Image (cartoon, grey):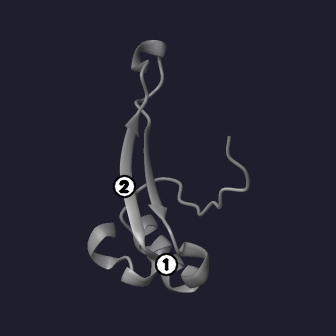
Amino acid sequence: MLYKNLPKAVGLRRVTLHKSLNPADGRDTVYLLLVECSNFMDHVGEAANLLPILRGRICGYTGMFRVADSF
């Protein structure tokens, strides 16, 4: 759904799905979906329109983050 509906102008670079490594600790399994875009901040309004759609599909928590520093 993200691949099809994310505006091309945001420059989709990578979609990765991460799963918790230790589900035996008594908690539910946790998944994290990361979507990396090269021009996201230039088109943040268009891309942010997808967040309510993801919430409607019961995808858990959603948010947008910008990398401030890397090493």
- Circle 1 packing at 10 Å, graded few (<14), some (14-19), many (20+), is some
Figure check: 42 above or below 16: below
The answer for how far apart the CA atoms under marks 1 and 2 are is 15 Å
Q: Quadrant of the C terminus?
A: top right
Mark yes or no: residue 1 visible. Answer: no
Image coordinates of residue 17 in percent, x first then y, are: 36, 44
Q: Nearer the viewer, residue 52 or 41?
A: 41
Where residue 61 appears, x then y in whole percent?
A: 53, 54
In the structure shown, which secondary structural element does the residue marked by tag 1 occupy? helix
Residue at screen point 47% across, 60% down? 36
In front: 33, or 29? Answer: 33
Relative to 29, is 40 above or below?
Answer: below
* Image coords of residue 31 (percent x, y): 41, 40
Q: Amino acid at mark 1?
A: Ala
Q: Give the residue drawn at x 61%, y 76%.
A: 41
- Along the line of sight, which residue is nearer the eye, 14 or 31? 14
| Residue ID for mark 2 | 15
Residue at x 68%, y 46% (from the top left corner): 70
Inspect the image, locate mark 2, and give the three-letter code of the amino acid beneath it.
Val
Q: Is residue 44 left or right of residue 31?
A: right
Q: Residues within 10 Å of mark 2 (few under 14, many from 20)?
A: few
Q: What residue is drawn where x is 66% and y is 56%?
A: 67
Question: Label 1: which residue?
Answer: 47
The label shown at residue 57 is none
Q: Is residue 23 visible?
A: yes
